[in-house]
Image (spheres, grey):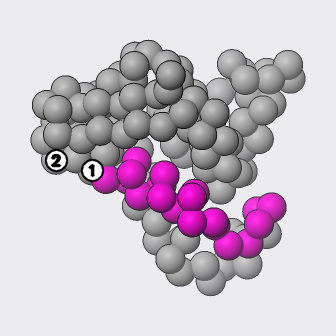
Amino acid sequence: MGLDIGCSCGATYISCSYSGFNTWRTELAKYVKIDLTKMNGFGKVAIPWTKKERFYYLLYHSDCDGHLNYRQCRKLLHDFDWLHQKLRNPTTKEFWHYLLQPVPEDWFLEYFDMWYDAVKHSVSNQCWLQFH
Ligand SMILES: [Zn+2]
């Protein structure tokens, strides 16, 4: 049992465990100053989402069903581009200040690249990413 993300055209595919995905996006959220464990849908504190958070569509998404359409992926792509640039050029102290670990580990970057590619594909081909 795990999380499978297939594209509506069949071209892109991500397969991982639910726990792996949730660990990864909890880390991803830290890069945009969000403690996912306190957000609505995740924790008891249940801080409401504004929907303007970076990576909102991915962070708030169900981990077992539903889909991301290419319009949502276009917004996500903007955030992936933004973080991609920061991760490769970690020059601003302000950015690294709130991270638990200053340098992202390989497994984080592996997931990051998988998602980045999937989101880029969705935008380029106007496909839907389906969670199941
Ligand atoms: Zn596709």
**For numbered disc 2, what is the local secondary structure?**
helix
Q: Position of residue 4 (x, y in %)?
A: 39, 29
- Amino acid type indicated by mark 1: Lys
Is residue 25 found left or right of 127 in the rendered image?
right
User: Which residue is found at the position 77% from the left and 41% from the top?
Assistant: 35
Residue on which disc 2 sits: 124
User: Which residue is found at the position 48% from the left and 58% from the top?
Assistant: 110
Q: Would residue 71 be seen by someone viewing this image from the given angle? A: no
**For numbered disc 1, what is the local secondary structure?**
helix
User: Within 10 angstroms of label 1, few (less than 14), some, or many (20 or more) residues?
Assistant: many
- What range of the chain is rendered magenta? 98-117
Figure quadrant of residue 45:
top right
Seen in the picture, residue 117 relative to 126 is either above or below; the reply is below
| Residue furthest right in the image | 45
Seen in the picture, residue 46 relative to 114 is either above or below; the reply is above
Residue on which disc 1 sits: 120
